[in-house]
Amino acid sequence: MKIYDSLTNKHFELVSKNVSIYNCGPTVYNDIHIGNARPLITFDVLVRFLKTTKFSVLYVHNITDIDDKIINQAKTLKKSESEIANTYYLHYLDVNKALNILPMQMPKVSENIPGIIEYIEKLIANKAAYTTNDGDVYFDVKSIPIYGILSHQNLDQLYEGVRKETATDKKSPLDFVLWKKTESGMNWKSPWSVGRPGWHTECALFVNKYVGDHVTIHGGGIDLKFPHHENENVQNYALFKRNIADIWMHVGHINVNNEKMAKSLNNFILVKNLLTEYSGNDIRWFMYQSKYENPLEFTHDLFQQSTNELLKIFQQINYGYIQMYLQKVKMIRTIATMDKEFLNALNNDLDLPNAKAVLSQQVKKMASIIRSKKFDKFQKIMGTINAEFNVLGIIYTNPLDNPEIKSLVDEWQKALSEKNYILSDKYRQQLIEKRVLNA
């Protein structure tokens, strides 16, 4: 499998069958929007595909439950920080379940404070970090010559984009906090002060703790490339003299009116709200409209078009199974193998639009197969489609598993056998209204 590395701007082939993946998770101060869900779904497909193609996968996805945003939300809602963090963490698990996300290791920052302190101590010992008189700890950016390698900028360019600070003990405006002295909000004792860790250190520690001195693939939203991923990388380099990832995989924004979807811009759509009207299948299918690294435009019309597309695919499959049932054709066991073109698409840097197009073409071929009553071929192609659905995380349910639908089909069959076409049309219309069949 080839994956595009956003550090070198080149494609790399996965050679080893043992793959480790780290994907930056949410800060649990609020519910996630669909822009946050895009990397979550993208990496879930990657994990599913790798496992299906016989890779051994270790997948880590952190939960940031200590942050200024959580403190501010706690003050606003007059609740404790732990209550806020746990509430939205549980909401996040609910969203994961609704989106059919596979289980993964999900370490929390609050449960790893001793490890983070020890990690910072190692950075200080390696002269890559320093303490201030105030009890803060900063990473010394100038101590690592590769700073800026991921964002493709040199130090001079980065300095230009940083506000010059004067009233601080920082050696450089680019130096970032590893430990912040504070008695406000959740805090812990450390060798330097009572305080809490900085954001950038938690992910570097988690890669080190759960994977080792580097990870095969490190990913997240494109907005994390700088400074978060850049800062992770230099911490790892300071300790192990190597980049934290072999491959950097960044997922593009979801845009609204050509602007990045963000809570700060108040143009976001919460996943939980979208799930009140649509399914996890619908959200996943929409995410496959463009390549993961490209921006994806969201409008309600575009989302509805995508939803209708998936519905028609399901309805075509439904029709096949119903015709099998009406013709009293026995189910046969089929070998679940993906189509070669589908495999090629995903092997080529997880090309989801092409993979989706291959699956859609397979469903179109199905129509003539059903008309000619070649149900052995129908079941064979369904074995392929089910394997592809599984990789895409799409859940298809045979409508005949629903007693109400099955009863309607039986009545439809009975009316047809009695040549009562007015009654049979009535039952067929009910199946259309229930969106089991297409009009």
Image (cartoon, helix red, strand yellow):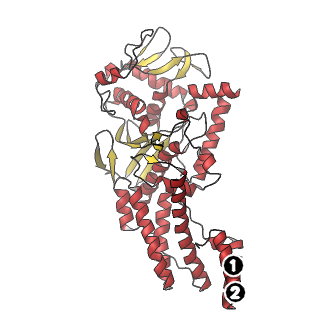
**Spatial separation of the CA atoms under disc 2 and disc 1:** 9 Å
Residue 325 picture location, percent across and down: 61, 81
Residue 38 picture location, percent across and down: 49, 47
What's the amino acid at mark 1? Answer: Tyr
Residues in magenta?
A: 161-169
Question: Which residue carries the number 2 mark?
Answer: 415
What's the amino acid at mark 2? Answer: Ala
Residue 193 position (above or below residue 86): above
In the picture, residue 111 is in which quadrant?
A: top right
In the picture, residue 80 is in which quadrant?
A: top right
Residue under the point 46% across and 48% down: 297
Marks 2,1: beta carbons within 8 A: yes
Nearest the viewer among 184 and 73 is 73
Q: Extreme bottom residue here?
A: 418
Nearest the viewer among 213 and 104 is 104
Of labels 2 and 1, earlier in sequence is: 2
Q: Quadrant of the C terminus?
A: bottom right
Residue under the point 49% across and 28% down: 199
Q: Mark 2: give few (<14), some (14-19) or many (20+) Cα within 10 Å.
A: some
Return the mark for residue 236. Answer: none
Left or right: residue 72 compared with residue 228: right
Left or right: residue 181 compared with residue 143: right
Nearest the viewer among 383 and 362 is 362
Return the mark for residue 427. Answer: 1
